């Protein structure tokens, strides 16, 4: 059987979802099979996505070429943004289907379809299938089904089953042709228990009536043969029933599953399941999306069908091997053994309980062992890591270009400054700066981790990571170092003396910016919210953030007013007041103001100082700019805002109004 001829190469998702310019393809065909549903198909690749009108409107924003970050900022401003996981999923799948491409494409002709020459009438197929099912069932009831007289009858039964499946697909192809659909792939499948001819139906995207007709067409030839065998050729009845059970097995692409979905199920938008965006591919995400989509009724019907199918299959097996199913059942409830049924039930329940406990235990053990393994691997990697070497001037120049606030130094001067830096290598456990050290040098951690052994920003014994400035007191204030900084691993620290600092750095980076950056980066590296942010995001945030103080009972945000700032608490404590009632507290390391910025709305509550302190704040444009530079950061801020609201901060196409777990 022919396969689809197109495959979009994999691309780094983070780059795709931040800085890559994407264009909406011109080779798209749009259908509206149901109210509130849009099917967009790429003409050249024949890949299709099921979208909502909102999804399709979002993709239209890429006409003319735009980055995902720019579109996301526009959607937030216009209050038309999806939940970020759903938005990123939509972009990733549209790119994978060729609907969003990295360069403007030209209209292309559709690939040639197969020359299908005959059609079938859907109404005739439905009525004929219903009549054949009735005739076959009556024949099976009136004529006892038994084993064939000779095992040879299984061979023609197997052959007729293969032909019935093939005829069903051929009939379904005729229905597609009659509906004006093109058929692009058809052929023989040999590596299976029932070799057959198959036609690519794409009935997932078909209208409900056409999908129903396609499912019935696939089983109509089987019921025709079963009816003939039940009335006239009894030796073929059981082999054909076995073949029919094979075809009707409760599998995802079986005709009964297609029929059930066509009658009782509206296909979900492609961005709400089958996740391809890395941020959505978490444990239980598939099961959670299944529940959120309200598929419980469909699942119960599917389970009931599976039970019925299993019982019928067991009866067929008993007939095939000459067993009496009634004697087997009677043996389980024999009066001579009154406890057998209870014992059997107890064994089933016991096995189920053992299975559940075992699954939970294995899951917990795997998670715990995974954490231990990652810790051991990190420690082993630290021990086996080659000894750090002194960086070259070029490497220091590139490092300074990524470190705040040294980006403010012009390129030429930065190169000269990099050449003036001295690199020093320290072993693990060796002190980099001792408390009381008066040496006026600027120190920047280049490689490794160092631990601060005295308080810094009211933190005790915390670690600093590469890019952090430390030990600046003697240089900027002529004061001895207040704390000892010891290397937690082998480190490389680059230092600059006072003379070179004042000649090369101070002209472009004033003292207060150095001190500000040292405190900001060290603070951001410690609090849980920002600890995992990439170095570039930390530098971007620290460069934009301004330190402000607040007093007790000072109103930082007023309820029902416009907000243009994003806040991160440095010190102190604030309280959240809604309609005159205190509903929460905001403490050191917490953020606030994000809800009104993400929803582009008025504030939902007031924020009032409870204990005097300070906070970092950045403007709304800067907040949206750095938010859209990193998908993990955007998802993190969205999750915090949604938890505080008790519902999704953005409107969702799959769970509108549903509350999220706190």
Image (cartoon, rainbow, N blue to C red):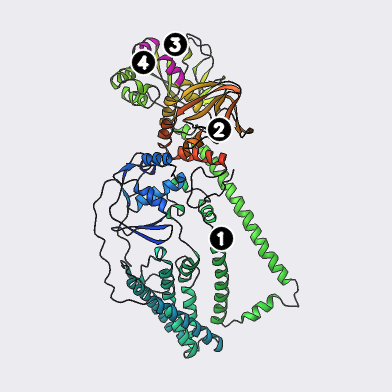
Q: What element does badge 1 sit on?
A: helix
Residue 273 in the image: above or below residue 568: below
What is the x, y in percent for residue 392? 33, 23
Mark nearer the N terminus (3 vs 2): 3
Q: How far apart are the alpha carbons under marks 3 and 4?
A: 14 Å
Residue that numbered label 3 is attached to: 440
Image point (39%, 57%), residue name: 38
Residue 473 in the image: above or below residue 565: above
Q: Quadrant of the N terminus?
A: bottom left
Q: How far apart are the alpha carbons under marks 3 and 2?
A: 48 Å
What is the x, y in percent for residue 584? 62, 33
Q: How far apart are the alpha carbons under marks 4 and 1?
A: 65 Å
Residue that numbered label 1 is attached to: 296
Residue that numbered label 2 is attached to: 559
Residue 229 in the image: above or below residue 357: below
Mark nearer the N terminus (2 vs 4): 4
Is residue 164 among the parts visible in the rendering? no
Q: What element does badge 4 sit on?
A: helix
């Amino acid at each position: 059987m022919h396969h689809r001829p197109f495959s979009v190469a994999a691309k780094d998702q983070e780059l795709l979802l931040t800085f890559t310019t994407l264009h909406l393809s011109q080779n798209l065909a749009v259908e509206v099979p149901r109210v509130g549903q849009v099917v967009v198909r790429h003409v050249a690749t024949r890949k299709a996505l099921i979208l909502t009108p909102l999804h399709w409107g979002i993709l239209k924003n890429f006409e003319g070429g735009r980055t995902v970050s720019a579109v996301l900022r526009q959607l937030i401003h216009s209050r038309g943004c999806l939940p970020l996981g759903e938005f990123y999923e939509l972009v990733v799948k549209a790119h994978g289907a060729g609907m969003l491409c990295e360069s403007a494409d030209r209209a292309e002709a559709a690939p040639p379809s197969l020359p299908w020459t005959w059609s079938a009438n859907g109404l005739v197929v439905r009525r004929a299938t219903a009549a054949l099912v009735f005739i076959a069932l009556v024949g099976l009831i009136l004529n006892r089904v038994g084993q064939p007289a000779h095992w040879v009858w299984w061979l023609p039964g197997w052959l007729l089953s293969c032909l019935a499946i093939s005829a069903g697909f051929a009939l379904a192809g005729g229905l597609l042709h009659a509906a004006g659909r093109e058929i692009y792939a058809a052929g023989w499948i040999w590596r299976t228990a029932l070799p057959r001819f198959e036609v690519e139906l794409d009935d997932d995207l078909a209208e409900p009536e056409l999908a129903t007709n396609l499912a019935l067409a696939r089983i109509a030839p089987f019921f025709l043969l079963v009816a003939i065998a039940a009335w006239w050729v009894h030796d073929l009845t059981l082999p054909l029933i076995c073949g029919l059970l094979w075809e009707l097995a409760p599998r995802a692409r079986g005709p009964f599953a297609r029929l059930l979905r066509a009658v009782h199920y509206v296909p979900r938008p492609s961005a709400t399941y089958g996740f391809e965006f890395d941020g959505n591919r978490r444990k239980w995400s598939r099961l959670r999306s299944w529940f959120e989509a309200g598929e419980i009724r469909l699942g119960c019907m599917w389970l009931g069908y599976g039970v019925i199918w299993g019982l019928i299959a067991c009866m067929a097996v008993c007939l095939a091997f000459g067993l009496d199913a009634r004697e087997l059942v009677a043996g389980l409830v024999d009066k001579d053994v009154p406890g057998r049924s209870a014992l059997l039930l107890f064994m089933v329940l016991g096995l189920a309980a053992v299975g559940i406990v075992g699954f939970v235990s294995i899951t917990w053990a795997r998670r715990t062992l995974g954490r231990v393994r990652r810790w051991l691997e990190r420690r082993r990697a630290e021990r086996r890591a080659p000894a750090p070497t002194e960086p070259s001037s070029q490497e220091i120049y590139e490092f300074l270009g990524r470190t705040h606030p040294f980006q403010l130094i012009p390129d030429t001067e930065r190169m000269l400054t990099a050449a003036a830096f001295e690199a020093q290598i320290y072993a693990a456990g060796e002190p980099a700066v001792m408390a009381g050290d008066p040496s006026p040098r600027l120190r920047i951690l280049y490689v490794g981790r160092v631990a601060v052994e005295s308080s810094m920003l009211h933190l005790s014994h915390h670690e600093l990571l590469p890019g952090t400035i430390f030990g600046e007191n003697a240089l900027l204030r002529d004061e001895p170092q207040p704390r000892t900084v010891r290397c937690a691993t082998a480190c490389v620290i680059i230092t600059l003396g006072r003379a070179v600092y004042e000649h090369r750095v101070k002209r472009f980076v004033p003292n207060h910016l150095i001190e500000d950056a040292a405190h900001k980066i060290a603070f951001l590296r410690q609090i849980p919210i920002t600890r995992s942010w990439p170095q570039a995001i930390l530098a971007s945030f620290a460069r934009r953030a301004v330190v402000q103080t607040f007093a007790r009972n000072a109103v930082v945000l007023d309820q029902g007013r416009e907000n243009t700032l994003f806040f991160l608490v440095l010190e102190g404590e604030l309280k959240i007041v809604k309609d005159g009632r205190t509903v929460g507290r905001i403490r050191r390391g917490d953020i606030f103001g994000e809800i009104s910025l993400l929803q582009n709305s008025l504030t939902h509550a007031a924020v009032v100082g409870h204990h005097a302190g300070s906070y970092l704040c950045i403007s709304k444009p800067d907040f949206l700019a750095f938010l859209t530079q990193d998908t993990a950061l955007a998802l993190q801020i969205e999750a915090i805002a949604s938890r505080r609201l008790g519902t999704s901060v953005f409107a969702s196409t799959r769970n509108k109004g549903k509350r999220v777990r706190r």
